[in-house]
């Protein structure tokens, strides 16, 4: 058995501070807090301590359990010196680990509460708990009713434990663990910064990359600012400064191709900041009309023009033999501009784009 050194918040997760027969605890932490590692370790310790017990490990989708949580269980078993087919067996069909002491751990998806409503459990673990529904949580809570307990179990308590990143809105975790918590419900918030085993540069790199709100949620492990509902939360008067167009430094043209209106933004840029100073917003228009308007406004630009924007502008459609960016390229070539295109093969997910923009507006 290896020697494990738990962080203070992880110790809180393991230890039960009340006398209730059921303990419900949620371990909410930022990146790098070992949430899955801690949850799978507790599951194995319960299987060891209470021979013949039955536990369930679930997530919204079984693939998440299979690719993340289950792997953490096997890593712990290997570290503890457990040998497959001697100390435990794994049944791929039933998705179940059975220990030589009779304990069982089931692995399931929790997307449909009907799939596990007939189970009788001693404990249950939820991976990425914020992703499951409140009905799944209630159904799982109702499965903790297995009366098959041995006298040797002594101080046994039914346990439901989960780990998660904070929810992006006021979901069931907020309501059950913050607004109306019961005496046997515990919420442990574990910031990434308290993990002494992470390399020193890790936290600083996250501060540089994330906007303040995202940093509070994903690194500090705190709940979001649910009162605002704003997409761009960090914008303030500090972002508004006088910016002068300079024809002798590179000009960035970033394009969106909605027809009504079509919106293009124009900026200068350095390594740290983007300085927007103009935009084109034209209703019921075309890419050709927009690039002509851009050239009319900036006829004497001497430095490079860097074109970027919506990746879909590089795709052909049935209405034209030219893509949007081909139309822009032909116009810039015709008038002899120095230019380059910086385009992605596809657009990143919307949430990623929002986070990137917010980080530019105000980082952590």
Image: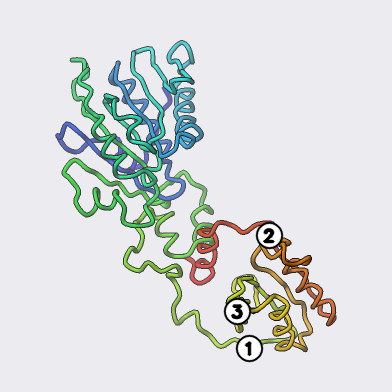
SS at circle 3: strand
Give how far across and how far down residue 280 sits, in percent: 62, 82
The quadrant of the picture occupied by the N terminus is top left
The residue most toward the front is 319
Q: Quadrant of residue 273?
A: bottom right
* 167 displayed left or right of 18: right
The disc, 2 or 1, on the residue closer to the chain's N-terminal end is 1
Mark 2–mark 1 CB contact (< 8 Å): no
Give how far across and how far down residue 93 sits, in percent: 47, 20
Q: Residues within 10 Å of mark 1 (few under 14, many from 20)?
A: few
Give how far across and how far down residue 78 sits, in percent: 49, 23
SS at circle 2: loop
Q: Residue at x 39, y 38 (%)?
A: 111
Q: Dot 3 corresponds to which residue? A: 275
Q: Residues within 10 Å of mark 2 (few under 14, many from 20)?
A: few
The disc, 2 or 3, on the residue closer to the chain's N-terminal end is 3
Mark 1–mark 3 CB contact (< 8 Å): no
* 153 displayed left or right of 309: left
The disc, 1 or 3, on the residue closer to the chain's N-terminal end is 1
Q: Dot 1 corresponds to which residue? A: 244
Q: Distance between the Cα atoms at labels 2 and 1?
A: 29 Å
Q: Dot 2 corresponds to which residue? A: 344
Q: Distance between the Cα atoms at labels 2 and 3?
A: 21 Å
Using the image, determine if residue 325 lies above or below residue 124: below
Give how far across and how far down residue 123 sits, in percent: 29, 29
């Amino acid at each position: 058995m290896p020697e494990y050194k738990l962080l203070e918040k992880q110790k809180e997760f393991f230890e039960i501070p009340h006398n209730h027969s059921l303990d419900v605890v949620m371990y909410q932490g930022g990146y790098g807090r070992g949430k899955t590692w801690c949850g799978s370790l507790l599951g194995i310790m319960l299987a060891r301590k209470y021979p013949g017990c039955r536990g369930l490990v679930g997530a919204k989708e079984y693939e998440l359990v299979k690719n993340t949580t289950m792997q953490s269980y096997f890593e712990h078993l290997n570290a503890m010196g457990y040998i497959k087919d001697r100390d435990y067996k794994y049944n791929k069909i039933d998705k179940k680990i059975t220990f030589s002491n009779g304990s069982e751990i089931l692995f399931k998806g929790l997307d449909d509460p009907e799939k596990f409503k007939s189970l009788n459990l001693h404990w249950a673990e939820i991976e990425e708990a914020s992703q499951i529904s409140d009905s799944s949580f209630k159904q799982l809570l109702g499965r903790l009713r297995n009366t098959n307990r041995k006298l040797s179990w002594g101080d046994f308590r039914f346990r439901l434990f989960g780990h998660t990143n904070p929810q992006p809105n006021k979901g069931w975790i907020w309501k059950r663990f913050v607004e109306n918590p019961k005496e046997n419900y515990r919420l442990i918030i574990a910031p990434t910064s308290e993990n002494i085993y992470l390399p020193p540069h890790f936290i600083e790199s996250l501060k540089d990359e994330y906007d303040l709100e995202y940093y509070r949620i994903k690194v500090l492990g705190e709940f979001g600012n649910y009162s605002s509902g704003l997409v761009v939360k960090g914008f303030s008067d500090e972002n508004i400064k006088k910016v002068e167009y300079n024809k002798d430094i590179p000009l960035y043209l970033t394009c969106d191709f909605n027809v009504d209106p079509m919106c293009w933004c124009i900026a200068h840029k350095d390594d740290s900041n983007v300085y927007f100073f103009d935009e084109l917003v034209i209703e019921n228009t075309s890419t050709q009309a927009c690039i002509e308007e851009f050239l009319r406004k900036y006829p004497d630009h001497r430095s490079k023009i860097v074109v970027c924007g919506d990746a879909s502008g590089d795709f052909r459609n049935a209405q034209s033999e030219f893509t949007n960016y081909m139309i822009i390229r032909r116009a810039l070539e015709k008038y002899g501009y120095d230019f380059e295109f910086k385009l992605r093969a596809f657009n990143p997910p919307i949430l990623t784009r929002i986070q990137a923009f917010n980080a530019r507006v105000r980082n952590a």
